Image (cartoon, rainbow, N blue to C red):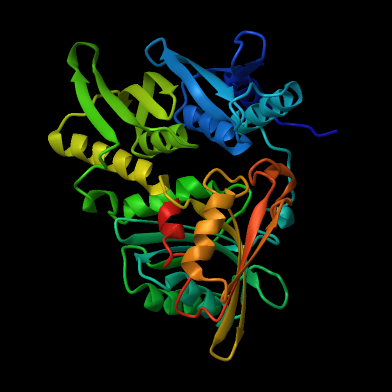
Amino acid sequence: MERYHPSEVYELFVRHMNTPRVVVDNGVCATATLVQVHSARKHGVLLEAVAALSDHGVCVRKGYISSDDGRWFMDVFHVTDAAGRKVADADADALLARLESSLSADALPPRTPPSAAVGAGMPTLLELVGADRPGLLSEVFAVLRDLRCDVADARAWTHGGRVAALVFVRDEETGAPIDDAARVRRVESRLRHVLRGGALGARMVRADAAAVNMDRRLHQLLNDDGEAESRADQAEETAVAVQDWGERGYSVVTVSCRDRPKLLFDVVCTLTDLDYVVYHGTFDTDGDHAQQEFYIRRLDGRPISSAAERRRVIQCLQAAIERRASENSLSVTHAEITTRGDMAMNVFHVTDAAGRPADPKTIDEVIQRIGTESLRVDEERWPRLCSTEGDAGRGGGGAGIFSLGSLVKKNLASLGLIRSYS
């Protein structure tokens, strides 16, 4: 039996008292499942809850956020499955378990020997940012293949003429992480040349694939790259505004746009990473339209105080909404690249923007744009490759497979697929 020092026992007690409480109820509402999260003030708890809902594949139809001026929060979500039905009882239990697991991440971890520390056997994460152009993804994969790096998982977004990608790689022969300093520098140098500049370029880091929220990290990379500020105009169907409520010390953010999967996550993620706390809020959907309103303050308790700060919030929210809005929304969840001389065979496992099997109409559009002479499509419903035990709900349970031969200068990005997932 493990023994803890008295100070650790006290820390465990404090964390237990502050652990958010979660309720999932199927009996309150006739049309949706009710999810309630009660938590003490801690920056990021709202985002953790919304991320868990998104990862589980449920759709947030409406809800609200309330607090007693920041000491205690209550978040209420009305959720349905993708078909608009209440979450089944069995799945509701799984949703409760996911939320409790995500929100109790601060529980005192079991002791582990130094040799079992995080890092053993993990893939190496490549973070890439650069100017978007046709053929970029194929060039990146060709470089990785040439350097004997096996691609385990990948995701890329483009927006405003910029591209950000996360690529998990291992050594091609051994399957081990790539951590030799000289080899890391060589990979980064080659990829920076392919990306042709950027605030970040290419960087390799050790990371636990199961612990990385890829969507959040892609938002961060594009924001750090200045992509949001490069687009001055908002899409016609999207309206973002920031107003002052001086007498209560809040800034009021309103979002009105077309509803889609993970919209609430993208908005809350952006506000959280800009270091704002949501004290109160409402969000609702009417058909395919979404309306959201949030009362926010900075981490220091102050509202937005300048026109420049207000403009940045609007730009970052607008960009976050547009990155994922798409005509052909496909995500590359796994890639296999084989080269023979100057020829390449690229196999992309793709899902829709929410991680579910791609819409057959989207597949048909891809076939028409690429041409059947260079493309074979196999639609299979199978668990995501490289999934872990804790990742069972993330992939949506299916993927379409694109086998693209002789496409050295063309790829999914040049066809607007990666850009439209953005």
Q: Is residue 64 left or right of residue 346?
A: left
Where does the image place residue 117, in percent across and percent down from the top left? Answer: 68, 53
Question: Residue drawn 27% across and 22% down?
Answer: 252
> Can residue 157 be seen?
no
Where does the image place residue 367, in percent across and percent down from the top left? Answer: 54, 64
Specify the quadrant of the image occupied by residue 160. Answer: bottom left
Q: Is residue 220 left or right of residue 146?
A: left
Where does the image place residue 162, in percent across and percent down from the top left? Answer: 33, 61
Question: Residue drawn 52% across and 71% down?
Answer: 371
> Which is nearer the eye, 350 or 280?
350
Q: Is residue 364 above or below residue 36?
A: below
Q: Is residue 68 above or below residue 384?
A: above
Q: Is residue 2 above or below residue 198?
A: above
> Can residue 362 be seen?
yes
Q: Is residue 141 left or right of residue 227?
A: right
Q: Is residue 291 left or right of residue 404?
A: left
Question: Residue drawn 37% across and 41% down?
Answer: 321
Quadrant of the image for the N terminus? top right
Specify the quadrant of the image occupied by residue 277. Answer: top left
